[in-house]
Amino acid sequence: MTKAKSGLRVAIAGLGVVGSEVARQLINRAGELGSAAGQPLHLVAVSARDRSADRGFLLDNIDWHDDAVAMARRDDVDIIVEMIGGSEGPALELARQSLASGKHFVTANKAMIAHHGSELARLTEDNNASLMFEAAVAGGIPAVKTLREGLAGNRISRVAGILNGTCNYILSTMEVTGAGFDDVLADAQRLGYAEAEPSFDVDGIDAAHKLTILAAIAFGQQPDFNAVSIQGIRDVSSVDFAYANQLGFRIKLVGVAEPGLMPRMQTCMLPLDSQLAKVNGVLNAVEFHGSPVGSVLAVGPGAGGGATSSAVLSDLLDIATGRGGFAFGKPVDQLTDASGVKNGAGPDKAFYVRLMVVDQPGVLATVTAILQKHDISVESLLQQGRAPGDVVALVMTTHETPVAVMTRALNEMEQLPIVKAKPVAMPILPVDMES
Amino acid sequence: MTKAKSGLRVAIAGLGVVGSEVARQLINRAGELGSAAGQPLHLVAVSARDRSADRGFLLDNIDWHDDAVAMARRDDVDIIVEMIGGSEGPALELARQSLASGKHFVTANKAMIAHHGSELARLTEDNNASLMFEAAVAGGIPAVKTLREGLAGNRISRVAGILNGTCNYILSTMEVTGAGFDDVLADAQRLGYAEAEPSFDVDGIDAAHKLTILAAIAFGQQPDFNAVSIQGIRDVSSVDFAYANQLGFRIKLVGVAEPGLMPRMQTCMLPLDSQLAKVNGVLNAVEFHGSPVGSVLAVGPGAGGGATSSAVLSDLLDIATGRGGFAFGKPVDQLTDASGVKNGAGPDKAFYVRLMVVDQPGVLATVTAILQKHDISVESLLQQGRAPGDVVALVMTTHETPVAVMTRALNEMEQLPIVKAKPVAMPILPVDMES
């Protein structure tokens, strides 16, 4: 699929943190990267909004384009690296035109792949090009390659990932400091760990894009962002961290994909002795479960110019050495339609439940009667301090329970006069890999 | 490099735990694996010592060979999977003949690759075949692929791995139980975690084979087992676990490879808040450090039929989909000779030191005078309990010190009349990835 060893001509669209880092690597490490590629990689063209910005490299021998899409129309470009972002607009137009003209396309654009991956993969196949997006999932962790190639011989039973460094940082900091979501978010924004408009991160959307891509590869289905259940971290209360700690858990936003079920982003309780619970701060992690391998975990930096450019370079080298392959591991025509997956919650789960109840005689009997009625078995129960007549927390963990049953029981509890707020419930993830 | 999509014919040499598992997977999951491969993978021939053993699959349509090497001479075999083991003998003969006849060769044989990797890679290049050994390093973790492809765009500055599950299990168990090496080894042998002849594992040889391979790929050098410094775990004393715990460390056998230096297997102190310290029991882990990526960690099962067969299947699928490539990431002629690497110990290191000294006045002054003379700065010091006239442990950690300087100081200390045993010293690994 690649040209002869005369070299590959690369154009970069978008010179933000990652695009500029990729450009600098291609320029400053041309010898090394050419050796790894088996042929020179020439940066021949770039496009960005502001030509005059200082990005740490010279534009002298590089063509500048005000219009990124123009680069797709050049005959003397072999690979387009797209770092514009956004699921639609110029990024999508660039992708379509690049692939239609047989150019290889490398991107970090998780939103675009989650929304338009099937269409783009088909263009790839029709035009004998490669679509590579290692940088779109978990930054510097080669998660796409691990799943699509390294574990390709497995029947995947679950992929579970901590896929957004901002959320993980906020949750880790809430746990350590005891501070509330709003305060920690404000700090994270000041430190540059969260955007001024944080919704994309804290509402789970960014992570859900990545989960969409992982699920597509893991289960051979068309990427379908609309078939993902998404919950963010805004509703996590600082009090839950204290209870989690007492019960031996840590709260994380985890994306879980299982075969035949809707992938879901949700805040979970992770047992402290699980490997995933130990991934704190801005780190990302992906845990792969399958047969025959068992469980494999990869941890690394999920964002930033260095980590993301490493993934882009890996894609460029794969293209240069003829390792492109099918975008999602198999031809698009063999991918199943994911829109029909059940909005189920998978196997029975253990739950953490927090009820805010009036501290009065009989509360415990009332609550446990509902649990008993639904055949829900309690594993542990915390009720601390006394404040007769006031509202206090009643915290419990359950044994494994069908999710639909737990939902009904929670709805019933919420109707009780003594229950003063919507019950908080989080699934407790099983430990697949003990440390 | 691969045949047309008419299918690939696979022969397996060696039907132990892994070989049999690979055979069962190829037979029982033929449809799935053929779909992932883009063409059928036919198991056409096997070879093992005992034809009559029950291995959970039927030999009806599979040719049996008493002599594995005979399979290399068949024209109707495309890929040989070698699960015989041993760096020389039939495995090596099979590899040579298979590759010389243009057959792809997939192996879990770390000893053979560590000793003969360059010769075999050259045969591969001369005969347009692929040599694949994902299963040779860290079992189910795609460590070879991660380093050779996933992080191919990086300049690697260090690879650090927990590469032998038996050693990690023994050290983890010594830490938890307080038992000594011999007792824990005996238990591990009873449980099947250690071989009756444990030397290969506990003396670090198996892990050093894997480290040799990782170093070759990481730094583009010929694999050279003789250019690896090897220490096992027999000398680790149970008392060191107690001190390690007090000081916030965990003892692990870690293989470390750095550019321009002799790779080394050694028992190290890992800060408890490092990711690698949390990899306990029979798990393996590899931490990759490089630029621009930063640090990436992969954790998983390092041995066993399931994990290892996953790696073998990944190699088969890479071959089937044309992703073979160069065995060590580049042509053999471009690999440097590793035999000239310095037997240095790399950058300055912090150390854990335990001296067994006579508890008498002036001991501390004598020891610290030697440290001062060598300009070694002490970070912490533990001397617990008093036993005048008896031998007690004097434990200290140092700030970063040149290894040669530390070696000289330890030699001087050993000569002191008050020092009653060879000083124990372990480097403290820096934390590259906090949890």
Image (tube, coloured by chain):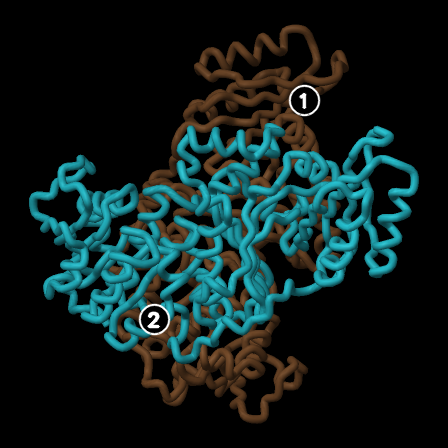
Chain colours: A brown, B cyan
Q: Identify the residue shown where x is 69% and y is 16%.
A: A358
Q: Secondary structure at mark 2?
A: helix
User: Which amino acid, by three-letter code, is at mark 1?
Assistant: Ala
In the displayed structure image, the side of residue B351 where residue A298 appears, left or right: left
Chain label for disc 1: A
Q: Identify the residue shown where x is 87% and y is 57%.
A: B372
Whether residue A135 is visible, yes or no, is no
Mark 2 lies on residue: B119
The answer as to whether the residues below labels 2 and 1 share one chain is no
User: In the rendered image, which quarter contains the N terminus of chain B?
Assistant: bottom left
Which one is nearer the viewer's eye here, A314 or B154? Answer: B154
Q: Quadrant location of residue B343?
A: bottom right
Q: Identify the residue shown where x is 57% and y is 69%.
A: B259
Residue occupying the far bottom of the picture: A60
Which one is nearer the viewer's eye here, A133 or B19? Answer: B19
In percent of width and height, residue B301 lies at 43, 44
In the rendering, which numbered label is found on residue B131? none
The image shows residue A201, relative to residue B321, as above or below, that is above
In percent of width and height, residue A197 lies at 64, 57
Query: How many numbered marks does the figure carry?
Result: 2
Which one is nearer the viewer's eye here, B244 or A119? Answer: B244
Q: Are marks 2 and 1 in contact (CB under 8 Å)?
A: no
In percent of width and height, residue B388 lies at 87, 30
Mark 1 lies on residue: A393
In the displayed structure image, the side of residue B112 where residue B255 appears, left or right: right
Q: Quadrant location of residue A256?
A: top left
